[in-house]
Amino acid sequence: MSMTLLEATGLRRHYQVRAGRGPFGAKAVLRAVDGVSLSLKPGRTLGLVGESGCGKSTTGKLVLGFIPPTAGTVRYRGTDMPPAGTPAWRALRPRMQMVYQDPLGALDRRLPVGVQIMEPLAIHGAKSPAEQRDRAAGVMAAVGLQMHQFDRYPHELSGGQRQRVVLARALMTEPDLLVCDEPISALDVSIQAQVVNLLLDLQDQMGIAYLFISHDLKVVRQVSHEVAVMYLGRIVEQGEAEDLFARPLHPYTRALVSAIPVLGPRRERLLLQGDPPNPVDVPSGCSFHTRCPFATAACRAETPALRTLPDGRQVACHRVEEPALQVAA
Amino acid sequence: MTAPLVEVTGLTVDFERDGRSSRAVDGVDLAIAPGEALGIVGESGSGKSVTWLAALGLLPARARVGGSVRIDKQQLIGAAPKVLEGVRGKRIAMIFQDPSSCLNPVHRIGWQLVEALKLHRGLDGAAAEAATLRLLDQVGIADARRRLGDFPHQLSGGLNQRVMIAMALAGEPDLLIADEPTTALDATIQAQILALLASIRRDTGMALVLISHDLGVVAENVNRVAVMYAGRLVEEAMGQDLFGAARHPYTQGLLAALPTLTGPRRRLAAIPGTVPEPGKAPPGCAFAPRCPLAEPRCQSEPPPVRHVGLMHRAACHLQIDVGVSAWNLPRAAE
């Protein structure tokens, strides 16, 4: 299992925008994703967390080739991902699928869900209608839908059932990789647990790898083997899921983890000042220095690289090894 | 307990549509003491927001509201518009999930704050401007004087929520109803806003109703918690009792369904099935179709709300013992 399924190296996605008001404002570059590298093994889950605008969804789309990167490469099973839209890319697409946050937006309201579940096979598999229907029945059972729901329309199903339909559709082509972008954020608490358990069961049974994008740290911890934390287009910390949340090292990760309200006894909170900076105007040096309680002159001047510590944790922080920071933790 | 500030008794809300009516709130009883923080938890459609919109007369005409909501001795249900205008904003203020859609996009925030001050406190001119700056300072907006000239779209979500809170504080209300105030915000900003609400309560002694689907948010910010399901109150207790010793199968299920941030990872105990659609709640206990312990009488008779401990009420036919979870009993294994 040591073979890498997906490897992204130095992914960047920059957008030309107008920084000033109106169409005559000065041109500026929005660095949505600015040098992200990640790798994923078969059957494993990498969680990608961060606040809105940190580039986690853009990273998901870059990985699948939905948008072309400004720089960087994506390799799938050791070979370069072909450019989007080419026949070679189209041939790879059944291997990797995307699941979005809003199932109602991802489904066609005017088609029965069964037809939508079969559609990927009609596009990619070219199987006979009877075979398509058999396979649809199989994946519907796998995601906990009943056959009588085959002819229902999306509005006739509940939110949780709709997300199961979206999952069933993604599973039709037996993918190796699912990129899940906030797949349960739109669901109620009691339904979230159903879908989380379903995702874990499907991984067990089918060996699917997930790139699991979410702002919900508790859910990410529940489903991920490894977790990467993003801030303003970069990964600032990455490590094994339980360890990362038990012992966050980067000041941003620490603030993020401490900001999550919990049921148990209240913990010490590292409250950040201010809002995240505008991604058009990313601060110099470490982009977190404007909100970091430990920032020094070096942090303002020099961008910290993502380094691997002796215990395997990856952190992009100049000061992470200093005793002063450990004490403050 | 001291005399309640606000007392809700037997509140019902029915929505009429196409000649049929569906019940969104079904006999809710709640009381809030002066200065207290009450959390209301529930999934979508549980009636947690509608309860308070009904109390303030903010529902559309096709909603029929019954029961009673009193602030001090003043009845609000069916009260004249003049009476409600004197209560809204002045006695009870409300803030919502999405601040940018509640602020007027074509007016500067300074203008909007002055409007609120004029309406609730009769301030004008220099006095209003001074009060506006004080309010912005109170909600932690730096450089307040420059911000007065900004439009809502120029501010971030967190700043807009602070402006909303400032506007709600303009009338110096006795009770603030915060309906999912941080759901649209990022985690680090959510922590800032919740800390702000706590400090305002410390300074002013204002009571708070915090409506949220996030049990963690509620656990950390209130004294007492009420859980709603399908328009009914199913359990109410002090925070530590509710989160430590829940007695209703639904509350127990909700708690077991939550992933945690610490400790070993275990498989989540998912509640099977889905929330009933509005107006289609079963005749008995609304949770019966999903409850692992449901008996025949649960299907037919609505359970009474009973005291199960000190300041602890639950609406369940089966009086589950302290420390027992409905989801660990043998029957739940099916």
Image (spheres, rainbow, N blue to C red):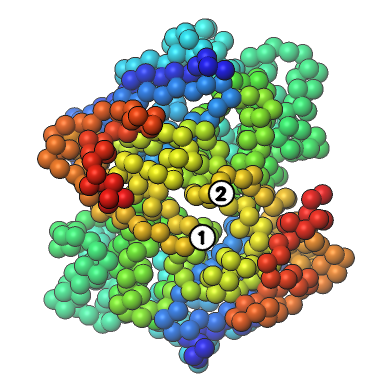
Instruction: Work out whether A99 lies above or below B97.
Output: above
Out of A41 and A93, give the one closest to the viewer.
Answer: A41
Q: How many marks?
A: 2
Q: Is the residue marked by circle 2 packed among few (<14), some (14-19), or many (20+) residues within 10 Å?
A: many
Secondary structure beneath dot 1 equals loop
Q: Position of residue B224 (x, y in %)?
A: 52, 74
* Amino acid type, callout 1: Leu
For label 1, count other residues whose C-alpha is less than 10 Å away and answer few (under 14), some (14-19) or many (20+): some
Chain ID of residue with mark 2: B
Q: Does the rendering let one see residue A14?
A: yes
Q: Is A176 situated left or right of B321 in this image?
A: left
Q: Residue at x 56, y 32 (%)?
A: A99
Q: CA distance from mark 2 to mark 1?
A: 11 Å
* Residue sitting at x 14%, y 63%: B145
Taking A180 as reference, is A115 left or right?
right
Place of residue A315 in the rendered image (x, y in percent of width and height, measured from the top left): 32, 33
Q: Which residue is mark 2?
A: B259
User: Mark 2 is on which residue type?
Assistant: Pro
Q: Which residue position holds label 1?
A: A263
Chain letter for the residue marked with disc 1 in the picture: A
Q: Is residue A18 visible?
A: no
Instruction: Using residue A137 as the reference point, say whether residue B110 is left or right of it.
Output: left
- Going by the image, does B134 lie left or right of B33? left
**Quarter-wise, where is residue A245 in the image?**
top left
Residue drawn at (19%, 44%), measured in percent from left and top? Answer: A295
Could you say which quadrant of the image residue A68 lies in?
top left
